[in-house]
Image: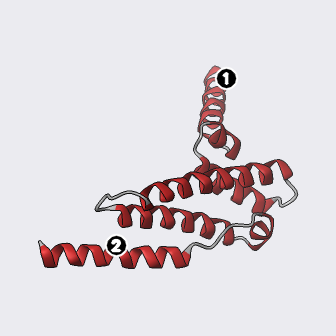
Amino acid sequence: MTKLYSLAIVGSLFLFYSCKTASKSYQKGDYTDAIERGVKKLQKDPTDYETKNLVQNSYNYTVNEYEDQIRILSNSKDDNRYDKIYQNYSALQNLYSTIHQYPAVAQMIKAKDYSDFVETYRDQAAEVHLQKQTNG
């Protein structure tokens, strides 16, 4: 009996500590994970307004952070700025894709499609790499 009781306690503790939620991710500042977990939760329960707000706030914060980095990189003289801008736009496009894989969630969270920017900066980064190879 005590073995069963101990096993139940250990199992409960394991579930408690391993069960990561969108709000825990948000509180830790892992906004991408909060978005992913929140989107899955909203897909199951679209009426969960607390999770909707959490996902919307996480999305807005993340977009602002990436767009700030893109502005900084756009004004820099760094040789790899186009690669970095491309990576930032790719991350933003991944957020868009995460949200848009569930139509009900996509209607709630108005995510921006960055695919044109991804394509543009992918091409610019490739052009810079080709010029380096040709000149180098």
Q: Is residue 105 left or right of residue 89?
A: right
Residue 124 occupies which quadrant of the picture? bottom left
The residue that disc 2 covers is 125
Nearer the observer, 102 or 59: 59
State the residue in front, 60 or 52. 60
Residue 47 location, x and y as percent?
A: 88, 57
Camera-nearest residue between 73 and 43: 73
Single out the mark in the foreground, 1 or 2. 2
**Compared with residue 12, is residue 47 higher up or lower down, i.e. above or below?**
below
Q: Amino acid type of disc 2?
A: Ala
Q: Position of residue 103 (x, y in %)?
A: 75, 73
Q: Indicate the secondary structure of the residue bearing disc 2.
A: helix
**Residue at coordinates 54% horizontally, 76% vertically from top-left?**
115
| Secondary structure of the residue carrying numbered label 1 | loop
Q: CA distance from mark 1 to mark 2?
A: 65 Å
Give the residue pinned by disc 1. Answer: 1
Q: Earlier in the sequence, mark 1 or mark 2?
A: 1
In the displayed structure, 7 sits above or below 48; it is above
Horizontal side of 66 relative to 9 (left or right) equals left
Query: Looking at the image, which residue sits at the far top?
Result: 2
Q: Tell me which amino acid carries mark 1.
A: Met
Residue found 31% across the figure and 58% down from its top: 78
> Which part of the image, by quadrant, shows the N terminus?
top right
Q: Residue 17 sits in which quadrant?
A: top right
Q: Going by the picture, which residue comes out furthest to the right?
A: 47
53, 121: nearer the viewer: 121
Mark 2 Cα shell of 10 Å, populated few (<14), some (14-19), many (≥20): many
How many numbered marks appear?
2
